[in-house]
Image (spheres, grey):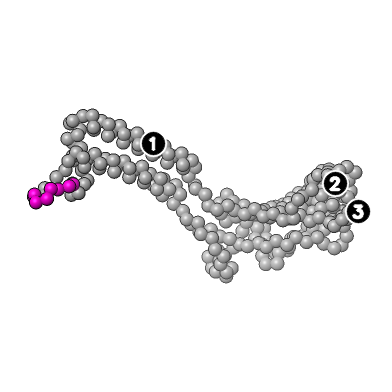
Amino acid sequence: MECPVGTISPSNDHSDYQYKSIQPLPYNDTLENKDQIVLLIQITVVLVGVIILGVVLSKKRFRNLIKLIDLFERSHNHKNNEPVYIKKNAYGGFFSLVFVFAAMFLVSETIIDFFGNNLQETKTLVPFVVLENEQKQFNAELEIHLNLLYYRGDCVKDQECHPLISIEYQNIQGSFYTSCTKDNFGCAIEMTCNNCEILTGSTVDLSFKEVFSYASGIELNLTSSSSIPDQKSSVVQYLEPSGSKVFRGPTPSIFLINSIPSVTFT
């Protein structure tokens, strides 16, 4: 428990990290419940095989017919010094059935993988000039969440960001939307850029000019959509003043984040 500057009560709302990155996970199977499907197919193959083999062994008529599916007719033992006759028999037919059902049991998982997971993922870094030949623009949905802990300015006026809070974008192209919210823990600023293109040297500059513009900590969460479907990249950074000081004055607090364009080919 600690009592941050600007508060009158202790709080444990303290970040125990300075940097955290969340990136897209490795490719997972697209087929849901694959293991359950494979197990169900294998159990079905085993049951059907046991039933068929039981029926064949219990009826003499089927034992005679089973000779027709003998796959090992050329591998039967032959007596020495006697003519070799290639013929089918019931033993060969029985083991041929066992072989067929065993093959179906073992191949079932491979077949399921082929139809539901026939994709191999390879990641690599390539020069940007090479990517430009394949992709002229790199656009993404960008979300920036900035939280000023225990900010004592108004932050919000008429349900919008306070006029003394200014935001400037440089070398960033897209459709921007900004909102501000204020609670007992500080001022939160949400910046959203739709169909956003980040160019070299891009910056987002925020200036707070209210009388009580100070904060006991600054947390930044930057999230962007990924070229991998249904995946996002996120970076969280936290700045904390030294000692019992606060962030205030003309010296800027700077977050540095590298943005690497990506593209997915399938």
The residue stretch that appears in magenta:
76-83
The answer to whether residue 71 is above or below residue 44 is: below
Q: Residue at x 90, y 43 (%)?
A: 8
Q: Using a 10 Å C-alpha cutoff, classify the residue at mark 1 as few (fewer than 14 neighbours), some (14 to 19) or many (20 or more).
A: few
Q: Nearer the viewer, mark 3 or mark 1?
A: 1
Mark pair 1, 2: CA separation: 60 Å
Q: Nearer the viewer, residue 63 or 109?
A: 63
Q: Position of residue 194 (x, y in %)?
A: 66, 54
Q: Is residue 45 above or below residue 127?
A: above
Label 3 environment density (alpha carbons within 10 Å; few <14, some 14–19, many ≥20): few
Secondary structure beneath dot 3 equals loop
- Which residue bears the numbered disc 3? 211
Give the amino acid at mark 1.
Answer: Ile
Rendered view: 177 above or below 38? below
Residue 44 magenta: no
Question: Would residue 115 be visible to someone looking at this image?
Answer: no
Q: Residue lying farthest front? A: 80
Q: Quadrant of the N terminus?
A: top right
Quadrant of res 60:
top left
Among numbered discs 3 and 1, the one appearing first in the sequence:
1
Which element is circle 2 on?
loop
Q: Residue 252: image x %, image y %? A: 82, 62
Q: Is residue 262 visible?
A: yes
Nearer the observer: mark 3 or 2; the answer is 2
Q: Is residue 134 left or right of residue 79?
A: right
The circle drawn on residue 256 is none
Dominant secondary structure of the residues highlighted in magenta in the image: loop
Circle 2 residue: 2
**The residue under label 3 is which amino acid type?**
Val
Q: Which residue is mark 1?
A: 43
Q: Position of residue 213 (x, y in %)?
A: 87, 53
Q: Is residue 59 above or below residue 9?
A: above
